Amino acid sequence: MMGTQRVFLGRLSLPQRGWVLQQLRSETVGGVLLLIAAAVALVWANSPWGDAYTALIDLQVGPERLHLHLSLGTWAADGLLAVFFFVVGLELKHELVLGSLSKPARAAVPIAAAIGGMAVPAIIYAIVNTTSPAGSPQGWGVPMATDIAFALAVLAVVGRRLPIALRAFLLTLAVVDDLGAIVVIAVFYTDQISLGWLAASVACCLAYWLLQRQRVTWTAIYLPLALVAWGCMHASGVHATVAGVILGLLTRIRVDPGEPSAPAERLSHRLHPLSAGVCVPIFAFTAAGVDLRAIGLGEALATPISIGIMLGLVVGKPIGVLGTSWIVARFTRASLAESIQWRDVGAIGVLAGIGFTVALLIAELGFEGSPALLDSAKTAVLASSVIAALLASVLLLGRNRAYAAIASVEEADDDQDGIPDIYQR
């Protein structure tokens, strides 16, 4: 007997729709600030005052006794991005418990799409750089991640009418991508591990989880505990941002009877603006300032590193996202919602090729100590993100009339009660 055919990219539940829209609004503003920060860094780094930019990023501050006398660039990557990954952990917890990843039947396609969108770019990069005498295979993780803030900034300009299901799909892709990136960072971009410090960080995370289970709400105990967990993770040799995503995943997401909101929801509401509006733009400012005065743009983009990254993000991402989505949908007998076509999924795959923030972070880890290679990697990330944004814009604008028709149905609220009429039929 044939199984019931499932719908892929169908209508979200009303609570999930509200949560997705709230997340997208915050990320869109952050994306604009990220682009401004990156542009300022690029202009400054290639101006006559470029040496001042480099000196600022390399300026070391912090307590020497705690082994935290770090450059401002390192503080941005290890410290500010820990806040970003904490928020990612909160978003992933919501998706796993309450959202699109909470039911295996619904989660199969987006998870497969995210994995394909990570694996295919990494494979393309590895092939290019292992077959070239001048290749650098250690950068295979760079083209894996999607920058949701940058992508949503593009949507704010050319894809305002994009169906909410496709927006949610992009958000899920990015969240799973970020989890995959943090696993790659922890496992493959860690040279030496101090087990004592790592155990101390794990103990702090365990204490955080126990306090959550005991419904302790005293902020004064959570903040020092999180800082110690971060510090111990940094001292262990594992990238400190790993502590952020672990703590986010350990935060309680379900609401107790009589409780207005769960801790994860409250923390996300408070920290999301800080992450998107401050932490990520500052990191972009410290990481995107590639000095091209000596080597030039053409030379920087002609290396195997750059070719591998650009092919991975611009070509590999859409192939991975669309290909695995189609295969898993066929295997699970899932059909697309009537209003959405496979080319729309392909456009989301192209948009996912915008790999800015986390790609720059992995580039810094993969090419640490090799400034020339790092500059090539960063230049390729910036260039491919712009190319992916332009290609996605063309694809989305080509479907703008169809998206407007879908939006008119999805957003219609004739009785003005704040709830779309489609949810009241």
Image (cartoon, grey):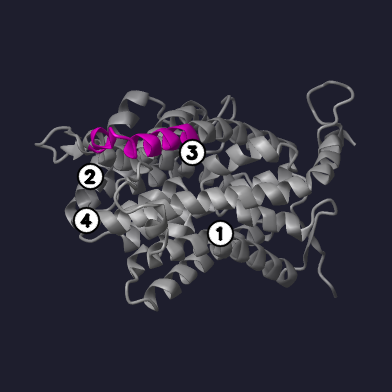
Depth check, mark 3 against mark 2: the one in front is 2
Mark 1 and mark 3 residues within 8 Å of each other at the beta carbon: no
Judged by depth in the image, the label closer to the viewer, 1 or 2, is: 1
Q: What residue sits right under mark 3 in the picture? A: 252
Q: Looking at numbered disc 3 in the image, what kind of residue is underneath it?
A: Arg
Q: Position of residue 144 (x, y in %)?
A: 47, 59
Q: Report the span colored magenta.
A: 34-54
Which residue is more in the foreground, 414 or 284? 284
What secondary structure do most residues of the magenta stretch adopt? helix
Callout 3 touching callout 2 (CB < 8 Å): no
Residue in the foreground of this view, choosing between 47 and 371: 47
Q: Which mark is residue 159?
A: none
> Can you tell which quarter of the image residue 137 is in?
bottom left
Q: Residue at x 81, y 33 (%)?
A: 411
Q: Which residue is mark 2?
A: 232
Q: Give coordinates of residue 277: x percent, y percent.
A: 47, 29
| Amino acid on which disc 4 is placed | Gly
- Mark 1 or mark 3: which is in front? 1
Q: CB of mark 2 within 8 Å of CB of mark 4?
A: no
